[in-house]
Every structure is written in structure tokens, then in C-alpha cells.
Image (spheres, rainbow, N blue to C red):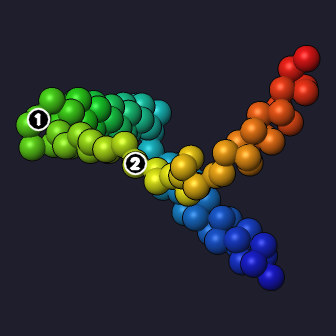
């Protein structure tokens, strides 16, 4: 359904443009093309140079966000382990280092 509508719309627009272009002489067509290319080039250059100009402006500069390092709390403080538990852990890990 949508494809048929698209095709009809495309044919309608294409027919009207062909009708307008058929009335033009070759010289008028060349002038029309040159005018359209010139307008496109002017708009394109304006947008490029405006963007370059905006980069250097003071009010366009953005502030740098400084992120402070996070302080991660110790979930298991070292002094909560008993001496016996520490020795067991040391023995366990030392058996793999031999």
C-alpha cells in the first residue's frame, strides 16, 4: 500500500520536474545548474567557516569537568582477622609458592 503511494508520489513529482525542465532552453538549464551549485557552495562554506569560528570563541568553550578520585572504604579491615586466621591463610598460600 505504502509502496504504491510512494511510486505515485515519485511519478507525480518527476513528471512535474520534467515538465518544468523541458520548457528550458539548454542555456537556461546551464544557468539553473550553475545557480543551484553556487547556492549550495555558499551555504556549505558558510556552515563550515561558522563552525570553525565558533570553535575559537570564548563563550562557546565548555568547562572541563574535574572528577575527583573515589575513596573506596575497606570492607574487611585487616585488624578484624585473628592471628590464627592470618597464619592459616599464610600457610595456605605458601603451599602454592613452594
| Label ID, residue 27 | none
Q: Check the image and report above or below for 69 versus 1.
A: above
Q: Nearer the viewer, residue 13 or 92?
A: 92
- Check disc 2 and report the residue beneath it: 70
Residue drawn where x is 66% and y is 51% of the image: 82
**Which residue: 25% across, 36% down?**
51
Q: Left or right: where does residue 77 sit relative to residue 95?
A: left
Eye-nearest disc, 2 or 1 = 2
Give the x, y percent position of residue 37. 38, 33
The residue singled out by tag 1 in the image is: 57
Residue depicted at 83% across the width and 33% down the height: 91
Q: In this rendering, does residue 46 appear at all?
A: no
Along the line of sight, the residue nearer the viewer: 50 or 13: 50
* Quadrant (top left, top right, bottom left, bottom right) of the C terminus: top right
Image quadrant in which you'd find residue 45: top left
Please tell me which residue lies in front, 2 or 90: 90
Q: Where is residue 77 in the image (x, y as percent from the top left)?
A: 54, 52
Residue at x 20% of width, y 43% of height: 62
Asked whether residue 18 is in view, the answer is yes
Vertical position of residue 19 compared to residue 59: above or below: below
Q: Do the residues labelled 2 and 1 touch (CB within 8 Å)?
A: no
User: Mark 2 falls on what kind of element?
Assistant: loop
Q: Is mark 1 on a helix, strand or loop?
A: loop
Q: Give the image quarter of residue 44.
A: top left
Disc 2 residue crowd, few under 14, some 14–19, many 20+, Cα 10 Å = few
Amino acid at each position: 500500500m505504502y509502496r504504491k503511494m510512494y511510486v505515485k508520489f515519485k511519478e507525480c513529482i518527476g513528471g512535474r520536474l520534467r515538465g518544468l525542465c523541458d520548457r528550458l532552453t539548454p542555456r537556461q538549464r546551464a544557468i539553473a545548474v550553475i545557480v543551484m551549485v553556487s547556492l549550495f557552495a555558499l551555504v556549505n562554506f558558510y556552515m563550515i567557516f561558522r563552525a570553525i569560528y565558533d570553535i575559537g570563541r570564548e563563550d562557546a568553550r565548555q568547562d572541563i569537568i574535574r572528577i575527583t578520585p573515589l575513596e573506596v572504604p575497606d570492607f574487611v579491615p585487616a585488624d578484624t582477622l585473628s592471628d590464627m586466621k592470618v597464619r592459616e591463610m599464610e600457610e595456605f598460600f605458601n603451599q602454592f609458592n613452594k
